[in-house]
Each structure stands twice: as C-alpha cells, then as structure tokens.
Image (cartoon, rainbow, N blue to C red):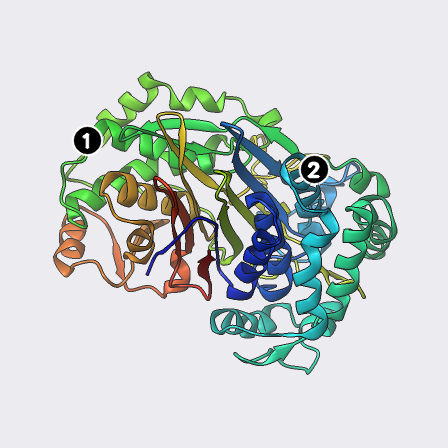
Amino acid sequence: MPLYARNVVATSQPLAAAAGVEALRRGGNAVDAALATAIALTVVEPTGNGIGSDAFALVWSGGTLQGLNGSGRLPAQWDPSRVDGLTEMPARGWDSVTVPGAVATWVDLSARFGRMPFSELFDAAIRYAEDGFPVSPVIAAGWARSAAVFGEFGPWRDTFLPEGRPPQAGEIVRLPDHAETLALIAETEGEAFYRGEMANRIVEDARSHGTAWSLEDLANHRSVWVAPLSVEYRGCEVHEIPPNGQGLAALVALGILDRLGGAAARDSADWVHLQIEATKVGLALIAEHLADPQSMRIDPAAMLEERALAAWAASIDPTNAADPRPTLPADPGTVLLCAADDEGMMVSFIQSNYQGFGSGVVVPGTGIAMQNRACGFRLEPGHPNEPAPSKRPFHTIIPGFATRNGQPLLAFGVMGGPMQAQGHVQMVERILGAGQDPQEASDAARWQVAGSDLWLEAGFPESTARELEARGHRVVRHQPPGLFGGAQAIMRLDDAYCAASDSRKDGCAQGF
C-alpha cells in the first residue's frame, strides 16, 4: 500500500529508510533524511552502491528546484594507450574507475540545505556497520551473483565474503572497515576522503596497479550545481539533471508523447507502442550526442524545443515499430531514494556503483568499493563521449522531479541502467497521464527497449503483447523482474504526501 504521512522516506532497503526517518525525528529536514538514508545504503545495500559511488540530486527548497551533479572525472594524466586495441572500456579494475563523487555530494548538500550536524548523519550507518545488520532477500540474491563476478579481487573477497561465501537472507553481516572509514569522513566532513588519509590510500592502491591517479585528482574534485532541464507534460513540468546524465532521453520522449495526445486505453497496444516509439527517439539522441557537457556538439536544450519535438512526434508511425535504437548494458547496481518533510522540502537522490559492486576494486582495509563509471565512455573515435583526461563519462543515473503551476508535485526515480530513462517515462505517464497513485504506478508491469528486443514484464495483457508483435516489435515476454529497475516516489498532496516503494526491491516507504 502507499504510505500517507507528513514526513516520509522511500528507498530500496528498509533499514536505510529507517535511518532517514530517524534523522527526521531528530529534527532534521528532508535533505538530512536523504543523506542519512544514502549513507546507510552504502552499508546495507553494497550490491548497488558504496562509499566510492557517484551521486546526483534534485532538491526543492525555498520555492526553487536545484540540481547537483556529483559525478567524477578520469584522472588528469589518464593514458589513452591503456585502451589501445579495445572496442569498449574495461568494466573491472582501476581502468574502469573515475574519481568518486558521492562523499562530496553528501558534504555539499548538507552544507547548503542541511539542518543537522554533518557527523550525526552517519550514526545509523556506522551502527549498522559495527553491530551488524540482517541482509534482506533481494540484496542477498545480488550478493550471491556478484561472488562469481568479483571473487577474483582479493580485497573485495576480504570485505564482502568474510566467511568465504555470500551471506544469506537474514544473516547478520558486519562491515568494520566501512565503519572506520565512515567515521573518518564524518569527523573530517569529507576532507579525509579527498585530501587526507583515505585519499592517500586510494591513490596508493591505484598506482600499485599501474594507473596515473594522483592526489590532485581527488583534491580537485568538485560537485556541480546545475539548473535542471524540463519539458511540459500533461499540464505539469517534468525536470531532469542535464547531461552528463541520461535524463534528457526521458524529457524528449515525454515531450513527444505530450504532442501525440493521451487518448489510448491504459496498457493497450496503442498506449504502450507510442511510449516505446517516443522513447526510442530519446535513446537514439543520447547514444549519438550525450557526453560531458563540455564535449557535446549540440545544446541539450535545443532537443527540447517545440520545433524539434513536434517533428519527432510527426515522424512516429502509430501502427509500425521503428528500427531498434542503441541502448546501454544492463545495470542493476544503483540505489534510489526520495524524502520529503512537513515544511515542503522534497528530494530525489540517486547513488550508484554502476554495475553491481562496481569495478571490483576495494581499497584494502577501507571498505571503499570503487564505482566503474569509466565504462560509460565510448571508444568510437571522434564520438563526443570518447574518453579523455579529466573528462566525465556518460552517466545512467538520474533523479526525477515534477512540478505543477510552479509548485512541487512529485519526487521520483527508477534505478537500473538503461531502464532509468524508460522507467521515468512509464512512471510519469502512469501518474500524471493515467492518474495512478505512485504505488500503483510502481507496481504496474513495465517494458524495456533492449536493442532489437522489446522486453515485457509479466502483467501486460496477452492481447497487448500479440498486437505489439503484429506492429513489428520483437517481444520477449516475462523477463526477470530485476531487469525492470526499482522505483521510489513521493507525491505531494494538500497537507501530506503519498509515498511509494518498488515491490521489486527490498525497501519500503516509512514516515510519520
């Protein structure tokens, strides 16, 4: 059931949600709650994020919506010869790592919006890491799958397989290295991570593997405050972080759908087909053009102009599927959370190690599992997303937000690699277009464009699947639910909120 309350947190792991509610009860605001939740998630859901993650946020406060891009860059002395002869970026090891930005994101959000002392945001996470926490079922299954992928990395095994095997659901796990590192970050307000003891240990391990990392790469890292991009949809404004995140694809798709109208019956072939075709346009655009903004050749805002959206809408055939469009590799390794308080502050926050535990790199003795975001680059010569020193890669993780008449309405998101932009389209269409509440929209069956295939989750009418096949879609039915992401959402009501958490994950919405 959806949760109705005046102070709420929704995320993919219940102990992390409890940490956010604890912050609210101690007098914190929605940003404090979001940060306490995010920090706890690095402990209780290490299968999707960690201390070495990147993060993005959208925050409604003081009558405005502000965005924060917490993604990192390749080292300044990155050597292109390390990828000579490869057709794609490495997915594991130090060559897949960019400077992690999550810790700086925590610091910056707390400094601008937070009410609680920064160090107190870590209390629950450190307690879980020191005293132990029972592993939840979906996370336990992901941990077991990861053992076969990351078992070759000694420090990873030492940290996450202390008994020589992955933990089972309900089993208590303690992460003492996490506790020590988080305590140091809390005490120094992140300084130790980027300019102190932790920075030295990160660079020492990187250099021991022959990379060009330096202390300056960490010391020079900065989060970037950004103005969100937006598009009108069904009388509302939907907002996304601008590139290097993929939110632009969702905005393009929604802008097209708004011009195509919304008369089709929910879950019918007509309804699903138009969403898919609009999404293909958005995915094709970002595959060709999206990169670090300094390297893009097209202004992202130009893709949201009326002339462009109208032309793309006119190009869509309502009865036939277009050619398949490029998509990204599947990615189950992300956590998403939303928070809101009784003073009207609302937050959509996303944090990720990218592919599961990320790169497989754990800095020895620290619990810092490094993301593998560098594999978001493309090795096609001349592509705007080609890797280069001090450059940020294409990012899959995107928080979402919607407003109506200049007032906050919906903080939301859907984790899961290429599912994220596609999931944003589907959640927005169900909530703002079809009038479903956030939990109904989250629980509903989803589709995903996956190369030349169209994946359909169980729950769509068989007549819809057959009609989509007749229109040229290569339908693959009933894919595992892990491929369809995990949504979190909070909708503002007159005097409270309606909060939802995805049934595909372990989490829940909590509040008071």
Q: Which residue is mark 1?
A: 261
Q: Is residue 354 visible?
A: no
Quadrant in which residue 458 is drawn:
bottom left
Q: Position of residue 333 (x, y in %)?
A: 54, 57
User: How far across and how far down the image is residue 397, in percent?
Assistant: 52, 45
Precedes in sequence: disc 2 or disc 1: 2
x and y, in percent, of residue 350 in the image? 54, 47
Which quadrant, please, contains the N terminus?
bottom left
On the image, numbered disc 2 is attached to which residue? Answer: 111
- Please determine whether, in this image, residue 403 is positioned above or below residue 189: above
**Looking at this view, is 330 or 267 the one in front?**
267
Residue at point 15% right, 60% down?
Answer: 462
Q: Amino acid at mark 1?
A: Gly
The answer to whether any part of residue 41 appears in the image is yes
Q: Residue at x 69, y 67 (%)?
A: 127
Q: Classify residue 283 as left or right of residue 185.
A: left
